[in-house]
Structures are given as structure tokens and as C-alpha cells.
Image (spheres, rainbow, N blue to C red):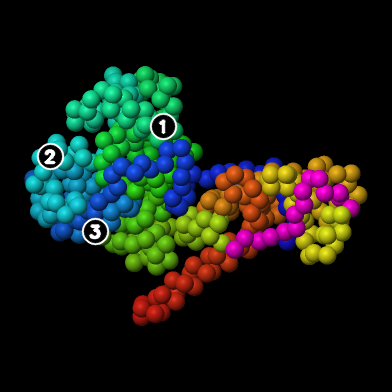
Amino acid sequence: MTSPDPAPGTGTGANAGSRTARTGTNAARSDSVSGVPIVLDEVSKIYPGQEVPAVDRVSLELPAGGTTVFVGPSGCGKTTTMRMINRLIEPSSGTITIDGEDNRRLDPDTLRRSIGYAIQASGLFPHMTVAQNVATVPRLLKWNKKRTRERVDEMLELVGLAPGDYRDRYPAQLSGGQQQRVGVARALAADPPVLLMDEPFGAVDPITRASLQDELLRLQAELHKTIVFVTHDFSEAVKLGDRIAVLGPGSSVLQFDTPEAILANPADETVSGFIGDDAALKTLTLRRVGDVNLGTTTTATLSEPPAEFAARLRGSSDEWAVVLDQSGHPVRWVRGDRVAGATDLASAGEPVSSTVTVEASLQEALDGLLSTASATTVVVDRDGVYRGVIGIDDLVDELRRIHKRHADDDAGSGADPS
């Protein structure tokens, strides 16, 4: 094992971005409406006076309860395609079915009230309070005041905004990230099975954007809505999407698959261009630290005499070891050749200044590792209890396994892995 970094590191802490379903104070209610399938069949949009379709015969099957991301360059028609789902734009031809029902057979207003919609810069009504904004659709559906107020408070708690602190504020009194959270709460207020999101995080700074992405992943793990998400950022698509539709001119579907499959085997040079030169690093966002075989090192508790610990270390190959407190939380790194002379383990070695959780992505683990001199860091569970260690070599081995699996799949299907 390589020596750890004694200097402070950034760490990742508890990561909210896991694709794995998690429970918490706002766990999914038994009566919550989950997602429904959406099918686009030969859908086109031709605007008057234009010969070239904005959307040309798009066919896609969007699975229920999953997040499908439309990604592509500006002007390719991805937003137009999404808006035809709730008929903010009427298709020129083709069929869109939602849970098996043709959306053209529904009254447009009724349809839109049954589909959540979140846009860039939140789109909140500036003259309404946060509570009034979130209550927009329940009010249109004529919910009674008690039910509406309870739902508003529930939605604010769900997106991490304390109702008592935010209910009566106006949008101008909120940060950009808080406004986007309110926008998501408003979109979910009537518990719709479908949520459309049109570049909702594009107008905020990168740190806030990452936080909002993590929040959306947490919410989706609880709610299982059918989400259609539009972005031009392929990294965002990889992080959020269960499936990605890479779109070209006229919303032509260049590739529609899982993020991992697209990263490993882009369909053509255009898709490769969207991915960029860091496909391997993007692949790391798809794996959790807990998905790999963690390394181990010798551990001790703070109360163990240093001499006894040193004797145990002499029987191992570990140059460094981890000292845990009585709750199992890592607190110190110690060197085997120096611990015998320490007065106690509470002051021996160096503090554990950087950890990653089992729920963190391997990309986040890499970020933490790069902040150290050793390329090794401690892994903990969500309660901060020691679970093992992870190093650069572990990440490289995982990337090799991912690419080998896809190469084997290609060989088995007769595809050319090149």
C-alpha cells in the first residue's frame, strides 16, 4: 500500500449523486404516482414556410420510471421534440402515446396539468411567493386549501427547502439554485407521472449545477418518475441519464442507449465528437465506490497501546495503517515503523483528512485521490464508518474490466470492436 497524504484533502463526503435508490426523511410515499411509458412514433414537426423539418420522423420508446436525456447541439430539435410530448408544440405528423394513450386525444390544458415541466432559470412567477408558485397546478386542479398547503410543504421539504423559512419568500429573495429547487417542487406538486426538464440547470454556476444534479438523482431514486431531460452537455447526460438519445439535425437519433454503452461504443464520429476525448473519465461517473473490490489495511482503535499495534503491523505488509475511533470512524493514518514510539494512537501519525463514501462515484473518488500525494484514500459508509481503502490502481483496473466486458459483448454479437 502506498503512503497516504498527510496534507488536507478535499474529499467527497456523502454523495447525493448515486443512482442507487436511497431512503431518508422524505422516502417515497406508498401512494405516490410512478412513471409511465412514452412512445414517439414517426413524429415530425414542420413549421410554416420551412421546407426542412425541425423534427423529422423521430421514433423513440422512453421507459417508465427512468430518466431519458436528449442531448445534441443547439438547433437540432431536442427541445421541440420534448415540447411535443405535452403539446406546447403540436406535431405535424406521427403519434405520441403516454401510458398507451394518444396525447392528441386529451384536452391540451388537462394534458399539461398532468405533466411536470421545469425550465432554465426556473420560470417562477416573480409576483408570487414560493408557496404560491409551488401551488400553481394544485390550484388549477381545484385542490382544497388544506391539501394544497400540505403538499406545498411536502414538496419544499423534498427539495431541501425548509417550509417555515422559504414558504413566504419571493423568487427575488432566493439564490439561483434555490429558485431551481422551487421550480422542481412546482413541477412535482401535482404528483405527475411524467416530468419534462428543458436545460433546467443551465443558468447556474458549476458548483450549484452539480448540487442540483445530485438532488435530482436523489429525488428520482425516491419517486421513479418518467423524466425527459434536455441538455447540450454530454457530461450532464451521462450523470443523469438511464438512457441517452444523442440527436442530430432534425432530431435524427444518432444513438439511443445506456450511458455506458455509448461511452464504450459510440455509433459514429459525430457521437464520438459529443463524448469528447475523456470517455474513460466519464465512464467513472457510472460506477460507485461500493461497486468495486475495496482494498484493506491494518486497523486499530484509539485505545490500543501503540506497542501492541506496532507488533501486529510487523506481521503485515502494510506500510501505513488506519486508526479508528470507538464508533469505527477513521481518524488517523500511522506509519508502521514509527508507531511503536508514540505515546498514544490519538496523536500518532497524521489525521485522516480526506475520505470518500461507498456511494460516491469513481470520478469523485478520483478527484479526491488527485488531491493527495499518495493516490490512496479511505472509504467510509454513509455514517462515516470505515469500509476500506481505494487507490488509483483500483480505478484503472475497473476501467479495464468495463472495456473488456464491452469488447467481449461486441465480439459475441459479431460487431467490430474497433
* Amino acid type for the residue under numbered disc 2: Pro
The structure residue drawn at horizontal position 31% and vertical position 62%, both measured from the top left corner, is 255
Q: Nearer the viewer, mark 1 or mark 2?
A: 1
Q: Amino acid at mark 3?
A: Glu
Image mark for residue 108: 2
Which of the marked residues, 1 or 2, is nearer the chain's N terminus? 2
Q: How far separated are the C-alphas under marks 2 and 3?
A: 22 Å
In percent of width and height, residue 280 lies at 50, 61
Q: Secondary structure at mark 1?
A: helix
Residue 365 lies left or right of residue 130; in this view the side is: right
Give the crowd class for mark 2: few <14, some 14-19, many >=20 residues within 10 Å. Answer: some
Residue at 19% from the left image edge and 51% from the top image edge: 98
| Residue at x-position 33% and y-position 62% | 257
The magenta-colored residue range is 293-307
Front residue (pair 211, 220)? 220
Disc 1 residue type (three-letter) = Glu
Quarter residue 171 falls in? top left
Farthest right residue?
341
Residue 229 lies in the magenta-colored region? no
> Which residue is labeled 3 in the image?
61
Mark 1 — residue?
Answer: 157
What secondary structure do most residues of the magenta stretch adopt? loop
Whichever of callouts 2 and 3 sits on the residue coming sooner in the sequence is: 3
Q: Secondary structure at mark 2?
A: helix
Find out whether residue 303 is within the magenta segment. yes
Q: Position of residue 330 (x, y in %)?
A: 70, 47
